[in-house]
Amino acid sequence: MVGARGTTLTFTVTHTERDGGGVCLRLGGELDLSAAGALNAEIDRLAADGERHVLLDLTELTFCDSTGIAAFVRGDNLVAAHGGWLRLFGATGRVDRILQITGLADVLRYQPDTADPQSPSAR
């Protein structure tokens, strides 16, 4: 995807294992229709591997449209069906605002000020 002034906009998903169990996915760039499939595939893979606790670090996410929101809900539903949970933290700017407006901040126990994914409030 090409953005303003010819810059290329990308979406990245990286993950790290948490010491206390679970995984933290760090999302970067723009989560939109062209990128939501990558997030869905990563969450599907983790769920198939038996992962039940997923944190999404949104610190470097600069944009999220309705397909990104749907990916969050889908991921939460997937892991919850197996007794798990999906939590969000670290969003800023427009991404933070969309989480508040849509009500996902409450549904997914969004922690805007939690910088540490090991924090008890993020679990």
Image (tube, rainbow, N blue to C red):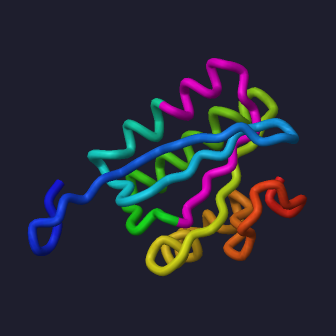
Identify the residue at the far left of this view: 6
Residue 55 within the segment the image draws in magenta: yes
Residue 67 within the segment the image draws in magenta: no
Picture residue at 48% right of the left edge, 46% below the top: 71
What is the quadrant of residue 49 in the picture? top right
Viewer-side residue, 41 vs 5: 5
Quarter of the figure with the N terminus: bottom left
Instruction: State the image coordinates of residue 66 (x, y, percent, origin top left).
Output: 39, 58
Instruction: State the image coordinates of residue 78 (x, y, percent, origin top left).
Output: 63, 33
Q: Which residues are magenta?
A: 42-59
Picture residue at 34% right of the left edge, 46% below the top: 35
Identify the residue at the far top of this view: 49
Picture residue at 73% right of the left edge, 36% below the top: 80
Instruction: State the image coordinates of residue 57 (x, y, percent, origin top left).
Output: 61, 57
Instruction: State the image coordinates of residue 102 (x, y, percent, origin top left).
Output: 54, 69
In the image, residue 59 sits, relative to residue 16, either above or below, namely below
Image side of residue 82 versus residue 120, left or right: left
What is the quadrant of residue 100 in the picture? bottom right
